[in-house]
Amino acid sequence: MSDDQSSAEGEKVEARAIVAGHGDFASGLVSAVDVITGRGSQLIPVAVPGLCAEDIEKLIRQRMTESGVKVIFTDLQAGSCTMAARRILRGTDAAVLIAGVNLPTLLDFVFAEQMDAIDAARHSAERGRAAITVVGTGGGVKQA
């Protein structure tokens, strides 16, 4: 998906965030968002197979520069994409990283178009956290 894609109605939809992670994690989440909402073009998937830490940082920084986005969602708290994003944010004003992203987080984010992307990312992180539940024997459903 690119930041110059058009919506079904023909209007230009700009990218609002990067989704980065191991394997096909990012493209899988972005694909799911697109199938469910038709709003996947708001997200730029970044895959990093076989890249070293320096190259991951360079790739994410390049995607941020090309698209102008200031929001990065990553898969793992201490994963290579998150570490690269943290290094990028040290020298970047008005940007945010959400580590540990899940599908409910991204769904909330793409529907928060009326909000600034950074505020929407923070809000969506709370919604994603609240969407996690544990179902098991002897206790029913519990919020994680």
Image (cartoon, rainbow, N blue to C red):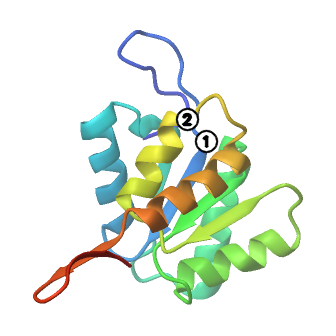
What's the residue type where badge 1 is placed? Arg
In the picture, residue 49 is in which quadrant?
bottom left
Label disc, if present, on residue 16 of the rendered structure: 1
In this rendering, does residue 129 appear at all?
yes
Q: Nearer the viewer, residue 56 or 106?
A: 106
Which of the 4 image quadrants contains residue 72?
Answer: bottom right
Q: Disc number at residue 3?
A: 2
Q: Is residue 4 left or right of residue 62?
A: left
Whole-percent x, y for residue 82 in the image: 59, 79
Q: Position of residue 36 (x, y in %)?
A: 26, 38
Q: CA distance from mark 2 to mark 1?
A: 8 Å
Q: Of residues 33 and 49, which is closer to you in this image?
A: 33
Q: Is 40 drawn above or below residue 71 in the view shown?
A: above
Vertical arrangement, residue 86 with respect to residue 96, above or below: below
Q: Residue at x 72, y 62 (%)?
A: 96
Q: Residue at x 56, y 36 (%)?
A: 112
